[in-house]
Image (tube, rainbow, N blue to C red):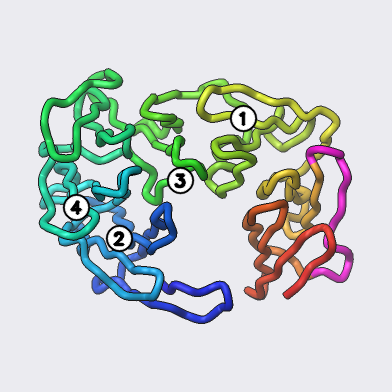
Amino acid sequence: MGLFGADGSQKGKYESPSGSVLCALWNPDSSGVYIWDNLTDFATQPQPIMFMDRHGGMHTLGLDGINPERSADGQWVAATHWGAKGYDGVWTVPAGGGAALPTVQGGGVRFLGWRGKDILYFAPGGIYSIPPGGGSDLRITSLASGEEVDLLPDPVYSPDGKVTLVLANNHQEYIMAEGRLNSFENGPFGMFDMAYSNSWTGPHATVGFSSSNGEGEALLVDLVDGAVERHSGITLTDAFPKAASWPWLAWAPIASFQQIHFTNLEDKTVFDLGTGAPDIRFVFPYPDGRFLLESMDSKVYFINPAGIHP
């Protein structure tokens, strides 16, 4: 895994000693990146969670685990501890350095995120909160016997940090907004896919659609309160939405995913890459209505309505 500056220069590099795939999450203040192993089975033992600062320097948290996240007040880092049989607790580390502390222990216990100054975690029977230094816990949500909730392997957060995407053991997708678990069972099509690709149209809003292939209305979904803002007149017949960077939506015809088009959700104007443009494999949203594109031959482009640039 590499860290690069805005000028393209490499600031740091880290490879897992075990050779496993890595996950990463930026600190909110961009001071550095937490790095951990993306584990796919309980038999694998993770390497210690690492922190790469913005200059490329590597620091260990002294904790074998996954899904670390710093508290909003910057005082603590919490993560799921990984024991001999998999998830077995939530541990915290002082953000300024120090020994890792077992805040909650027990089979199946895992860290879900922060609820204000408190840790939010799953344990059999529900979702709970507890102060990072330990103390009395509080049950937030009761769950049926056998029902489990976990972070996605590489958690997705809204820009303001109020929304985290989580996953139940029945593969039901959930929105966890400000410490509340919301199933959004009747949410619009594509809502989760767009959030997974970090296609945020606001601090905690993303894009959904009124049909499974994008045909009809484009809907802005507030994942905190569930409000929906409808944008009628956006017709993407037989289309596959790729990414959103407000106010632009990137999409491609289902018959050819590589022909990328852009529709402005505010004024309904459309532009495409033109017949001479390269075939595109991936589209990544960038702030302020811009996108990064990766072509089929792995070249990277920057795009805005003024044109495409290597």
Element type where label 1 sits in the image: strand
Identify the disc placed on residue 36. 2
> Which residue lies under the disc numbered 1?
221
Specify few, some or many for label 1: CA neighbours under 10 Å numbering under 14, 14-19, or 20 or more.
many
Looking at numbered disc 4 in the image, what kind of residue is underneath it?
Pro
Q: x and y percent of residue 208 in the render? A: 65, 33
> Which residue lies under the disc numbered 4?
94
> Which residue lies under the disc numbered 3?
156
The residue furthest bottom is 9
Asked whether 16 or 178 is in front, the reply is 178
CA distance separating discs 3 and 2: 15 Å
Q: Magenta region: which residues?
A: 265-277
Looking at numbered disc 3 in the image, what kind of residue is underneath it?
Val
Task: Give the label, 1 or 4, closer to the camera.
Answer: 4
CA distance separating discs 4 and 3: 23 Å
CA distance separating discs 1 and 4: 36 Å
Position of residue 274 relative to residue 71, above or below, is below
Looking at numbered disc 1 in the image, what kind of residue is underneath it?
Val
CA distance separating discs 2 and 4: 18 Å
In the visual, does 196 lie left or right of 291? Answer: left
Q: x and y percent of residue 249 in the render? A: 74, 46
CA distance separating discs 2 and 1: 31 Å
State the image quarter where residue 38 is shown. Answer: bottom left
Asked whether 133 or 182 is in front, the reply is 133
Answer with mark 2 or mark 1, whichever residue precedes in sequence: 2
Position of residue 96 relative to residue 90, above or below, is below
Element type where label 3 sits in the image: loop
In the visual, does 266 lie left or right of 20? Answer: right
Answer with mark 4 or mark 3, whichever residue precedes in sequence: 4
